[in-house]
Amino acid sequence: MTTETSGFCQIGMSSALERRDRSDERPDLFSRAGARLSRLERWNIRFVRASFSNPLLNRLMAALQRFPGSTWVEICTRQLRTVHGLERLPPPGELDNFILVSNHRSYFDLYVISMVLIQAGLKKRMLYPVRSKFFYDHPLGWWVNGIMSFWSMYPPIFRERKKAVLNHTAMSEVIWSLANAKVGVGIHPEGTRNLGEDPYTFLPAQAGVGRVIHQSRAMVIPVFINGLINDLKKQVSSNFDKTGREVIVMFGAPIDFGGLLDEPGNAKVFRSLADMSLEAVRKLGEEERALRAEREAARVPASSS
């Protein structure tokens, strides 16, 4: 779920590739990879892909995401976490294929967001595009993917220039999974973690997100999360001793894109869809900022005159 996906900005938009994509044909990352992928990367991709292809294994992974997966995240954040806006969504237990779009400041953003939905009744398995570095090209990556997400951090997104062309196919795999495997997908429109000091400013939206939205036609749910840090040990300990900053998760209603989804797919339309998604997240950020200020003001005792 650690989805640092700066490769979104490198996803090809060429008409030739678009014409080759068909929603009823599952993309084959290997056929386009050539010698670009190492043996370990190929093995990891095959394994995780198979975990979605095998119905029994897929159901098992979804069950493990619910328990123990979401349970440990819930326990490790419950003292600091507040959730708002769930009533704006369809019942999570009835969600079929959908896309979560959220801001990205911590490695753990989508862990917490997904946990909230799972605890609220979500039954579908989640899928999270993730950087290939470490998770697919390091021997420990397979193990970490397993214990942290039950092999749902998939497909890999590549930063290396010689592999960047594969990112188009990776996003085709996401589109195919939304249409055929009926999964939920967590994506950060910014494409990578925003390391700026202000949590209410954003990096530019990446057009590859818009392509996924346009071609999948899946429901898009915006989320803003604020308060998590990037130190796992400190984050967990501050939950139990209640010294950490409040973690606020703000859900928005599914995004209405108007007639934009009916426009022919092209770079301009994809960019517009990505921008609209990030704007919905930004508005939730303003809502969260006002709520946080109100809550923090209520905690400060009035000074005596």
Image (spheres, grey):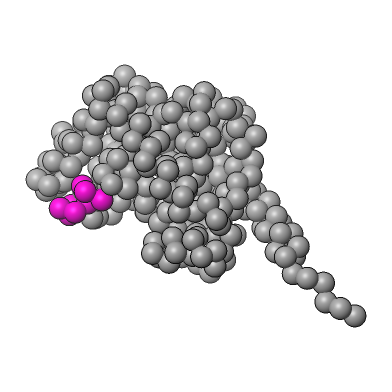
Prevailing SS of the magenta stretch: helix
Residue in view at x 57 percent, y 49 percent: 249
Horizontal side of 46 relative to 171 (left or right) equals left
Residue at the far top: name it. 24
Residue 143 forms part of the magenta stretch: yes
Q: Magenta stretch: give its range.
A: 137-144
Image location (x, y in percent) of residue 110:
44, 47
Residue 199 visible (yes or no):
no
Image location (x, y in percent) of residue 241:
51, 65
Residue in view at x 33 percent, y 36 percent: 64
Q: Is residue 52 above or below residue 38?
A: above
Q: Is residue 11 above or below residue 121?
A: below
Residue at the far bottom: name it. 305
Residue 130 forms part of the magenta stretch: no
Horizontal side of 68 relative to 85 (left or right) equals left
- Towards the viewer: 97 or 58: 58
Q: How many marks?
A: 0
Quarter assignment of residue 20: top left
- Towards the viewer: 298 or 127: 298
Residue 245 visible (yes or no):
yes
Horizontal side of 15 relative to 298 (left or right) equals left
Image location (x, y in percent) of residue 25:
27, 22
**Image quadrant for the C terminus?**
bottom right
Residue at the far front: name it. 241
Quarter assignment of residue 184: top left
Image location (x, y in percent) of residue 14:
33, 38
Residue in view at x 70 percent, y 55 percent: 291
- Towards the viewer: 248 or 102: 248
